[in-house]
Amino acid sequence: MAKHHISATLNGNAVEYLCETQQTLLEVLRDELHLTGTKEGCGTGDCGACSVTVDARLVCSCLVLAVEAQGKSIQTIEGMAAGEHLHPLQRKFLEHAALQCGVCTPGILIAARSLLERNPDPTEEEVRFWLAGNLCRCTGYNKIVDAVLDAAREMRGN
Amino acid sequence: MNEIRYEAPTRLEDAVALLAGANGVAKVLAGGTDLLIQMRGGRVAPALLVDIKGIPELTAIVAENGGFRFGAALSCMELIENAEFAAAWPGLTDAVKLIGSVQVKGRASVGGNLCNASPAADSVPALIAAGAVASIAGPGGRREARVEDVATGPGKTSLARGEIVTSFFLPRRPPRSGDAYLRFTPRTEMDIAVVGAGINLTLDEKGVCSQARVSLGAVAERALLVPEAAAALLGSKIDAPALARLGAAASAACRPIDDKRGTREFRIKIAAVLARRAAAIAADRAGRKN
Amino acid sequence: MDAKTIAPDQKALKVVGTRPVRPDGAPKVTGLARYGADFSLPGMLWGDILRSPHAHARIRSIDTSKARALPGVKAVITAADFPEQKYEFVGPERVAINYWHMTRNVMAREKVLYEGHAVAAVAAVSRAVAAAALRLIAVDYEVLPHVIDVDAAMAPDAPLLFEDMITRGIEPAPDKPSNISKRVELNLGDIEAGFAAADEIVEMNFKTAPVHQGYIEPHACLARFDSGGQGELWSASQGHFVVRAYTAQLLGMNIGDVLVHPAEIGGGFGGKTVIYVEPVAAALSRKSGHPVKIMMSREDVFKATGPTSGSSMTVRIGVKKDGKIVAADGLFKFQAGAFPGSPVMNATMCGFAPYNIANVRSVGYDVVSNRPKSAAYRAPGSPISAFAVESTMDAVAVRIGMDPLKFRLANASRTGTPTAWGPKHAHEGYAETLQALLDHPAYQAPLAKNQGRGVASGFWFNNGGESCATVHVNEDGTVVVATGSMDIGGSRASMAIMAAETLGIAYDRVRAIVADTASIGYTHVTGGSRVTFATGMAVVEACRKVTAELCARAAMIWKVDREDAVWEDGCARHVDKNDKGKSTGKFEPLSLKAIAAKRAVTGGPIVAEAAVNAGGAAPGFASELCEVEVDPETGSVKVLRFIVAQDVGRAIHPSYVEGQLQGGVVQGIGWALNEEYIYDDAGRLLNAGFLDYRIPVASDLPMIETIMVEVPNPNHPFGVKGAGEVNIVPTMAAVANAINHAIGRRLTELPMSPPKVLAALDSGAKG
């Protein structure tokens, strides 16, 4: 069977790739498009390390087939900064030491950005529940929550 | 090599025809959050995937006859972001909110949650309690079924070959109605329900329960509608004795298994606790005066 | 080369203790940092590993012919592709390894000893072809009865994993084989006399389930091994020198012919100080002639890498009415998994170590059973024995009506207190952690119904050991610090801080990198809380060599005696050695930048290396306070508050030290409440995924409050004590004690999941 020829938008740029039906978007991002910032932690949607947005919707890319991305707009961690300017979330994660090994960080940044787009003034509880789908084993989540709340403050202009 | 055909029809009749006429295993692809895991784990090896998300009827949400109709393939996030729906059915919305993470809800659908037929599916007890009706399209035409009649056992439904659940209808609610869904999980999020309890009730002007539906999940081979539990509430003001009767009826209705998520005994106990607590929340939402 | 004892620096510190952004930060928040699975090479093949479906079976035969014939398959290997290893325990007793076991764990030979045990591997042109090839390998198994639980494995009629295993450490040696690999015993004083003198004795039994380190990154590596006898690995590990040594040993290669590049690592906690996929990828690469990449699936990580031991324990403590502990006796039975080597010896040493007890006996059993070989997990062994000891301590305090913190304080070890394994404690710090909790306003705050507060303490040795560091001065006066320590948690920032402080220059003039195994000297693993301590020592020593050289260059420039130049505040200054080294004012101070600019005419590049075998590591002590609320109808436990007080010596980068404390505590909370390996009757793991192996999620937790007590270690230039591990040691007992005080029931089995809490409530098992 011939592979699917998919055209989509990735981090604002037009992209094309070939894929088999069973290949996930995660696999294609990493192995075909060589964007390894999105990580595989479990492959079953339980850890959130593979979080991306598809048409602005936060999803696990391990649970999206690559063929389903036809015509869609995908955002990965590689597109989060604006050139040399980090997104406030990225900056605050560094300032607050909200990463240790950093492998969960891309997924959490994508998820946190999605939260702040919908709710610019979340409570600590809202941040924790929104990020429940992103496992972190290193930090205990403390500094992650601090960083997200601080970034939200900055983005609100407080 | 495992080559899988993928089709994304935009018309319902094409989807039905593909499913009905497939050689080998054909699967509906909505959110894929159960299906992709089963494929990865080798538990299912479809020859054909029919992606139904491009069929407008299956992802719409509209007001209808004072109630709501939402597409079976509508993502959970889109459903819970619908303010009118959430205001009308807070219990069902709470249930849908509990389906996995935000990421999973960004893709998962209530139709998939029902048709995957896990006995622990979170939306199902709330749907059953709400009296939801599933619209089904198939080679033989359209039909309707009460949600409690769709799942028949773990991984099994009453759908015939080629049939797809297209939408769910939630009826108009009488005044002084409230619903609630609670589940028990070891963590606050990300777990499969060990027990789920969905309750929908209506109070009359005096605060007496005039209608009730009680449904339990994860305590049998499929979600149960428990008329005896509802009977415990009818005619009462949802007071402590009524809640005690409700709890006992809930426990009595359970026929759970021991598995890695919970033992029989634990599930039977918790069913009573959750049923009582859900009834109290539903009653509050129904606006009872204390 | 032994490390010298270096007096602690008394001057006010400028960089140490600040919180700059880590040097590897930007790549990690932009997705550019490369972890073990992120490397590729042209012509790369995908490797995949066939694993046993049985918990215990003899391998009668393996037929790989169909797999080899599948188009796209370029190599298939079994244990036959690895040389046999000598049966010998090497290294220090606590952490001895045996390559005969290691090669069998990497690829099974005579038997498979756990579900998930590797039996064969393939390299193919795609993941799909590799997976299909595995399905074509036919293994003929003779399934054997299995045993997993440690008590069951010690029973006389238990199925044996090794028919010739005779317990070491028993005199005379037993005449029958068993699953008990080793018995260890520590003694201090006379426990019979001690218990005879006790006014109260409490004895309790405990059981814990195996738990996994739970790192989010599965094991992965890329191997490029050629027919010329050399190879390279890109591997996520906690020690690329250890990866090199083990891979070379298992492949029968010279160490110098294997080069390991340190990839970024996505968590380890001890579980990546051992190897699984590297020798397999190397062997496949060598056989196929192409680079081979292997990524473990999450399921395989749970099934085939090393969780820590499950245990069965008994602790008995005798005390006088006034609170003085007079005797302590501990029995610790640990699962080693398929091959010997549980951390039981650590457990016997650490359990009573926080306390000054005249009469102690501590007995440990290392027991093999049909589950994966245990691997280190954050202070390996100590959290397990601490659960038993600290729960019993709490029960003793209740029995004599004494405040649990004051009870511990009254018995706290201090400098000079003997330990059960021989040396005397050489450092203060424990009592300070207890005092920090006593002084905390939360300790006296009232609690509501169904809420409870518990405390616990813990000890961990912390390690020193071998580390190397190289410091280069660049032409513009910036500096590169290279070490051999993989960076798990921000250590590059700490290295840069210590270098900047020692050199007297700004933090952002220093770049810290992790060098590969060919570019720097042997450096032991990133584990044992040793990096800031030992590698930091090497960095400081190398920087001091650099400042000495800079002074020599300055003296050359000024044409004065070498002793008339000193390094101070980032500059060489001219002093009069004959006048008590007073500043002369004769020459302008020379900055690092100025001297670097003149390096070519003063002798050439300015470089220094230091190699240490660091002694003088100070142990870690932590005391923790947990408040919980229990739902009496469901047994659900919610952690309302958690405070960890730990003696960190000196926090080089406080944010990263706090992060260690918070991270360890949260792992401990998961271990206490939810995490466990669940097996079916056939010995197969039922919860091999993050759905049902439940680590804490963000919404489960409150903010974890940290108190960093600083009692500097005089053996380190900045007073560092290892901080990464001891924070997990008290946590499970703190939670258990809090639950006990909330509901009046003591749970003695981990995890304390809701059904167990509910059952305890219903049964009335009083504490």
Image: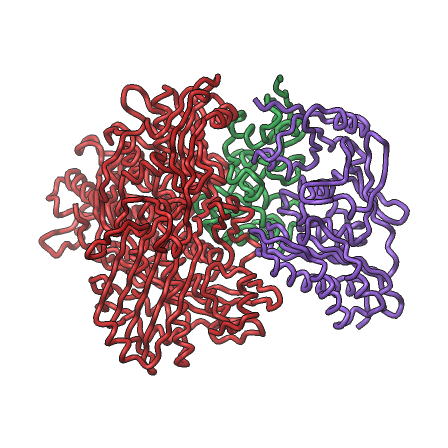
Chain colours: A green, B purple, C red
Residue A137 located left or right of residue B104: left
Query: Does residue C715 appear anywhere in the picture?
Result: yes
Residue C668, image x, y percentages:
45, 57
Q: In this view, does C380 lie above or below A19?
A: below
Quarter of the rendering occupied by the C terminus of chain B: bottom right
Residue visible at 37% across and 76% down?
A: C406
Q: In which quarter of the image is residue C701?
A: bottom right
Residue visible at 37% across and 48% down?
A: C159
Q: Is residue A74 above or below residue C625?
A: above
Nearer to us in this view, B189 or C361: C361
Q: In which quarter of the image is residue B168?
A: top right
Residue A152 located left or right of residue A97: right
Nearer to us in this view, A131 or C28: A131
Residue A13, image x, y percentages:
61, 27
Nearer to us in this view, C175 or A1: C175
Residue C286 located left or right of residue A17: left
Residue visible at 60% across and 66% down?
A: C631
Residue C111 located left or right of residue C753: left
Q: Which residue is at the far left?
A: C578
Quarter of the rendering occupied by the N terminus of chain B: top right
Q: How many labels does the image show?
A: 0
Query: Does residue C518 appear anywhere in the picture?
Result: no
Residue C272, image x, y percentages:
38, 42
Q: In this view, does C745 lie above or below B202?
A: below
Residue C228, image x, y percentages:
28, 19
Nearer to us in this view, C373 or C675: C373
